[in-house]
């Protein structure tokens, strides 16, 4: 449904033949539409998800609906809640491909009870940030090699959210305790407000990661563009959980998953982004292709550096002893 008018349409996506992409969280919602549209325009897309059964059935259905997709959609086993799984996914990808033009870090988890992963990280934070950090940094050498190829246009798109403004005011990313945070203001760690705070905390990390990654790429002279995205209010299973009994009413004002994917697709493919790269580098982009206004915390350059250092520390500790 949705009251909707877009300045960027799926038909505006340029030909992507020969390009290789990864889209995380691509077995439902915005992720499916992102992967589908990239593949329909010629890219080979690895759908980075947990469930082979679910994703393989989805690929089979999409190939049945679009015969040209045969061979363009590939499952890549990836559990974003696990650093090790993300590292294994990167190795598996590198064993199959010699280039990587695009990562859309779309996978997320929200509105779920607080839990620590086996690696000692808040599950929401692991799925939304640390897994993507581990996957992207493991693939960074391949992204950089691809960026040196003729006519390359390599991009990293991190799907954040306007909800990043709900991150706790105390968020500072000074110690690894931030990676375990319940984000609750009292003893009750579950419920609407703690859910929103944990999700906002992780989505703030997405934007800070985007900014620090771009800073490092620029310092090394690597021509890769990174962007953070707010997709809009989209009718997905996550929003259904968030809205509860109000969802049937709110759905009339929400975007469909395809409409919600358009901002990610703009960031991933629009020639305008490359033509105006200094404008879009590390930008927080909102529907549809507009530069949005992020929170003051999301603009904190020093916090972005601290988050990167802590993320590296977390990955090293998990590699060494299995947990932080």
Image (cartoon, rainbow, N blue to C red):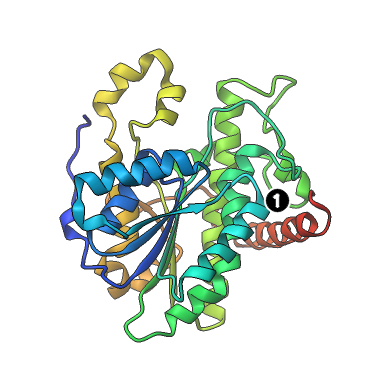
The quarter of the displayed image where residue 195 is located? top right
| Viewer can see residue 28 | yes
Residue pictured at 30% horizontal, 39% vertical: 257
Q: Quadrant of the N terminus?
A: top left
Above/below status of 78 relative to 170: below
State the residue in front, 15 or 47: 47
- Drawn side of residue 190 relative to residue 20, left or right: right
In the foreground, 160 or 76: 76
The vertical placement of 174 against 223, above or below, is: above
Badge 1 density bin: few <14, some 14–19, many ≥20, Cα 10 Å: many
| Left-right relation of 198 to 261 | right
Q: Position of residue 263 (x, y in %)?
A: 31, 51
Residue 300: x and y, percent? 59, 57
Q: Which residue occupies 31% across, 67% down? A: 273
Q: In the rendered view, would you say 272 is above or below 230?
A: below
Residue at coordinates 77% horizontally, 54% vertically from top-left? 318
Toward which corner of the image does residue 14 lie, by quadrant? Answer: bottom left
| Residue that numbered label 1 is attached to | 173
Q: Residue furthest right?
A: 321
- 29 on left or right of 253: right
Residue in view at x 78 percent, y 50 percent: 175
Residue 290, can we see it? no
Locate residue 198, reporting x and y percent. Answer: 61, 35
Label 1's element? loop
Labels in figure, total:
1
């Amino acid at each position: 449904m949705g009251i909707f008018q877009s300045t960027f349409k799926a038909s505006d996506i340029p030909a992507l033949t020969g390009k290789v992409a990864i889209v995380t969280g691509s077995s439902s919602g915005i992720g499916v539409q992102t992967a589908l549209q990239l593949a329909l325009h010629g890219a080979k897309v690895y759908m980075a998800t947990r469930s082979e059964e679910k994703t393989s059935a989805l690929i089979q259905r999409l190939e049945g609906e679009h015969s040209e997709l045969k061979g363009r959609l590939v499952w890549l086993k990836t559990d974003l809640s696990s650093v090790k799984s993300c590292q294994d996914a990167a190795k598996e990808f590198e064993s199959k491909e010699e280039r990587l033009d695009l990562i859309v870090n779309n996978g997320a988890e929200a509105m779920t009870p607080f839990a620590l992963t086996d690696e000692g990280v808040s599950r929401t934070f692991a799925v939304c940030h640390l897994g993507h950090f581990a996957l992207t940094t493991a693939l960074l050498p391949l992204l950089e090699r691809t960026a040196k190829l003729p006519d390359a246009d390599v991009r990293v798109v991190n799907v954040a959210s306007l909800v990043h403004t709900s991150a706790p005011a105390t968020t500072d990313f000074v110690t690894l305790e931030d990676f375990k945070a319940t984000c609750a203001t009292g003893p009750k760690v579950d419920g609407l407000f703690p859910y929103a705070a944990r999700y906002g905390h992780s989505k703030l990390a997405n934007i800070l990661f985007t900014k620090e990654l771009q800073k490092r790429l620029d310092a090394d002279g690597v021509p890769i563009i990174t962007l953070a995205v707010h997709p809009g209010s989209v009718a997905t299973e996550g929003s259904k959980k968030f809205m509860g009994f109000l969802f049937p009413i709110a759905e009339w004002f929400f975007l469909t998953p395809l409409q919600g994917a358009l901002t990610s697709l703009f960031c991933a493919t629009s020639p305008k982004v490359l033509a105006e790269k200094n404008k879009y580098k590390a930008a927080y982009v909102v529907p549809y292709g507009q530069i949005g206004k992020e929170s003051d915390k999301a603009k904190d350059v020093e916090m972005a550096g601290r988050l990167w250092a802590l993320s590296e520390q977390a990955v090293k500790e998990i590699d060494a002893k299995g947990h932080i």
